[in-house]
Image (cartoon, helix red, strand yellow):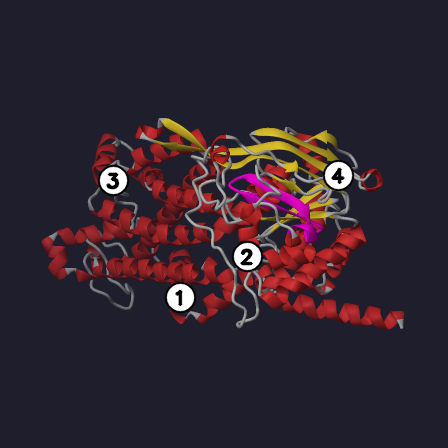
Amino acid sequence: MKNNIKDVDTLEVAQAKSEIVGPWAVAWDRFKKNKVAMFGAVLFIVILILTIVGPWLSPYSLNQYDLTMKKLPPSSSHWLGTDEQGRDVLLRLFLGGRTSILVGVIAAVLTVFIGSLVGGIAGYYGGRVDNFLMRFAEIVYSIPFTPTVITISGALMWVDSRYKMYLVMFLIGILSWPGLARMIRGQILSLREQEFMQATEILGLSTSSRIVRHLLPNTLAYIIVNATLGMAGAILTEASLSYLGLGVTPPTPTWGNMIQRASNSDVFRNIKWLWIPPGIMIMLTVVSINLLGEGLRDAFDPKEIR
Amino acid sequence: MINKEDKSKREVQLEVIDIKKYFPVKSGFMGRKVEYIKAVDGVSFKLHRGETIGLVGESGCGKSTLGRTIVRLYDPTEGKIIYHGREIEGDIAKLKGKQLKALRREMQLIFQDPYSSLNPRMSVSNIVGEAMLSHGIVKPGKEYKNAVMDLIETCGLSPYHIYRYPHQFSGGQRQRIGIARALALNPDFIVADEPVSALDVSIQSQILNLMMDLQEKMGLSYLFISHDLSVVKHISDRIGVMYIGSLVELAAKDELYKTPAHPYTRALLDAIPVADPTLKRQMKPIIGELPSNIHVPSGCKFHTRCPYVKDICKQEIPILREYDPENHPEHFVACHFAGEI
């Protein structure tokens, strides 16, 4: 008899374990059903793989100048043709993608890191700390982006082209965190008033476990969504900065400075393969990330999760 | 005055002495003028071991604040909370750090909203068991799992429910999880802050019965906060009535329902709907609005709405007293004319 009960117990446990539907599983389930978001995710992954793997498969190398082969239209040996210095455009497109996406990722990570740290501290501790950090955030928020970047880039003209990339990441990162900080702060403030946070206090849990186990997991969804959408924004910002010649400068390729070639009217009219491909790539990347981000936002919607 | 035998039998577990909780609000130009919301404004009472005191009052009268101040979720502005517990003995109004953490093992709180009181990103086993680990009551692993399973079963759920997440439960089940969490640290005294007001009527009685079973099994004392008089009547031994931060009447359940002495209590009891459409009700509704708890009326706080108001009510604050020890022992009222009107 007793054995019987135990068997039933383990059976129930096994069944229960198969029924576990955690919040992440719920989100993933919803995301899977969102066809548009899945399309965005797949497209982005394809672009990512192409930019990472592409350069290895190319028979050419980055600084392979061949003036006898310049301005060649797309052909079987140069799928996207060559530029004025005879370099393979397809290879530069892949490498430019690496730079552009890397700038986007790092700038977004930096934004998210500063933003959630500042917002989290302000929201959790409140009072004077909150006041100070939020006023500081507002100051940063009110700095006009483009003039500042033009000034800083101008002042740092002597920086080598290879390091310009890091400068751009850094600038985008430290100028775009306040929006996220405000949102995280609001999130933490509203979470703090939730009864489950009061429960952690009444249960005598430590501050670290309250932050790590209760607050953070509940803001993580927002952070992920924002990081994704912020990445698309950073890629666009990098592209426009590079287009203006203030971002990453040649010979390091990025999609932004590749499009910049179009400012030359000869290139614009006659060598279209130089600027149309990077333009399309920027568009596809940003659209795919935005679709992915929107899908994540819908999937994580906390109103339906609880 | 009080029956001596009765008194010795009933051991006092908690004594609240003139407790106050004020919340500052800034107003005026640049927040220069600081005023206080007097959420709890001088409440005193005793709670005996194994007893349930029901606390009723309109919304905003300070009953939740009182409960949360007693369990030290809020720091009291003034007053003493004397607690006679297993490890803690004496005034707990100013405990801090380690001692406050020890107090958490003696008294707990059950929350009102079963939706916002459970972390949506944690499994039931973590929600219920987290505190046990944090207080070192059980070791991680099998012991922990068994303890959580036992507890969840005691609260009327199946042991295998511990693997699930809150969104997979109904409101009543969630409230059971909330109760299990409160019991995890094996407390003796529980403040239940409107634990059933967010639930369907059919579920309410299940939860109330569960709470009463647990009380019997574990020897718990409750401070049961509610605005639903029928719920309070079902579960309480004694009932306290609050009005704008003060206790206006405190008496045994039957005594209070049969012979309410404070005009406010009478009005509250009159307002209970009667399930008989042919019965014409002799209801005298309370007139006027609830006064602000920042600028509290002078004297008796109820004087602005009381039908029996006299001059003395506007000047002198009535104290909570046993108005007729002979005929109504242990019936405390804060009214100048208790027994006369």
Q: Main secondary structure of the magenta part?
A: strand
- Residue occupied by mark 2: B270
Q: Are marks 4 and 1 in contact (CB under 8 Å)?
A: no
Q: Position of residue B134 (x, y in %)?
A: 69, 42
Which label lies toward us, 3 or 4?
4
**Residue A157 seen in the current view:** no
Chain letter, disc 2 residue: B
Q: Quadrant of the C terminus of chain B?
A: top right
- Residue occupied by mark 4: B13
Where is B130 relative to B161, above or below? above
> B167 and A228: which one is in front?
B167
- Residue occupied by mark 1: A37
Span of residues in magenta: B237-256
Chain letter, disc 3 residue: A
Magenta span has B249? yes
Where is A141 relative to A306, above or below? above
> A126 and B298: which one is in front?
B298
For the image shown, how many numbered marks are present on the structure? 4
Magenta span has B316? no
